[in-house]
Image: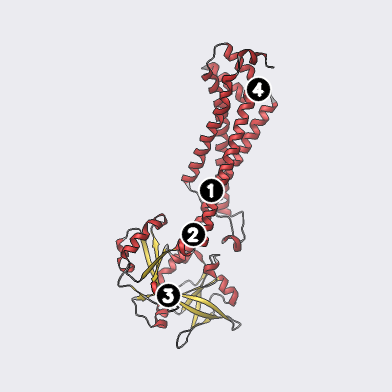
Amino acid sequence: MRNFFKIYNNLWTEKSNKLSTLIKKISFITISLGISAVIISSFILTGFKNAISNKVYNFSGHYTVSSYANGLSFKNSPIDLNKGVYKESKTLSEIGSVHPFILSSALIQSKESEIEGVIFKGVSSDYINNIQPHLITFNNNLNLKNSIIISAEIGKITSLNLGDSVTIFFPNDPPIFRKLIISGIYETGLEEIDNTIVIGDINLSRKIYKWNENQVSGLNIYLQDETSIDSLYDKLKNISSFDEFIESTNSKYIQIFDWLKLLDKNVIIFFVIIVFVASFNILSVILILIMDKTQLIGTLKSFGTKSRFIHLLFFKVGFKLSISAIIFANFISFLFYLLQKNFKLFKLNKSNYYIDHIPVDINILNTLMINLSMIAMIIISIYLPIIFIQKLKILDTIRFD
């Protein structure tokens, strides 16, 4: 056993052959950079998915319930809070909260007296807690009574700011005008929301349509855990009334969520490429090391050393190199995560990516799977060239010089 470690240390530290030493260094660097690139990509992908999906979910919930009649005409038809999903929602443990809303077409007047079309979303005061992370400025005593919350984009178009008085026109019959104060400004970076949605008091919306307190346009349903989105649809269907239409937010904003799925596929392709590159690198190292140490292999065989012993020598060298590279790759990746999470060093064009910096989040399971997959592939890559040792003849190896 003592001789084994002496020979192993000689294989790992011996520097007489500059080529094998150079190859080991290059392989260590390429494997480290490749694996760290995959892990960092996983952090960024998780960050993107969480940041963008949270923006959509915070404003729309995970499910929306509305009236079937709304899809058949331009008339805003109400659902009844005394029956259906709202009444039975407490029976489903997956549901965290349910927020009624009323949607109205409206026109908002800019400081230059120009008119901009918007969707007025009437909500109750507790809905504000969901969109709080996206408010970039707001009054200390934020409430929706006689006030509205607009997006930064609408504020830019209309030249309106926090505290300004604004006239809202509801094209009903007869038309209704209301003068409201801007009490908050939000920003998501999502055109589908920022370009259209103005948030106001649900009681104002009820007055506009002359609805009672049990009539609303729809419900935003927020789940305890978003992983239960797919499984909840049938349960919601079972407790809904005949006139209620149920739609997941993933379906409503399918373009955004399809884009996130495409990112998943790109990272998988990138990961496969990196695995093959890393495997090829370690395979090359072992082959070059075997060719460099052919005379040593012949000497060991001439003394009756078992092939299993020789295999283990080269396996340990390759495995140590690979594990060292993987540990270093994880160190680089987590260092990047900490720096980007705290200092937001790398910026993005918000108009293209919905966010102004590269978001990062850790998915422990994904990171673990990446590391285990790399180790498995590297073990296979180490073992393949070792088979070559069995084909070496003692006389040929001793003559080799």
Task: From the image, tell me which residue sits under label 4.
Answer: 292
Badge 1 element: helix
Residue 31, how many percent across, how many down? 60, 37
Q: Quadrant of residue 333?
A: top right
> Tag 2: Cα neighbours inside 10 Å, few (<14), some, or many (≥20)?
some
x, y percentage for residue 178? 48, 84
Q: Earlier in the sequence, mark 2 or mark 3?
A: 2
Kind of residue indicated by mark 4: Asp
Asked if labels 3 and 4 touch by Cβ distance under 8 angstroms, the answer is no
Measured in 3D between alpha carbons, the distance from the residue under mark 4 to the one under mark 3, in whole angstroms, is: 78 Å
Residue 134 drawn at (x, y percent):
50, 65
Residue 42, disc: 1
SS for callout 4: helix
Task: Work out whether mark 4 precedes mark 1 in sequence or the reverse, and give the earlier one.
Answer: 1
Tell me the amino acid under the disc marked 2.
Ser
Q: Is residue 268 above or below residue 293?
A: below
**Contact between labelled residues 1 and 4, with CB atoms less than 8 Å apart:** no
Quadrant in the picture for the C terminus: top right
Pointers 4 and 2 in contact (CB under 8 A)?
no
Q: Is residue 190 left or right of residue 85?
A: right
- Per the image, the residue denoted by label 3 is 72
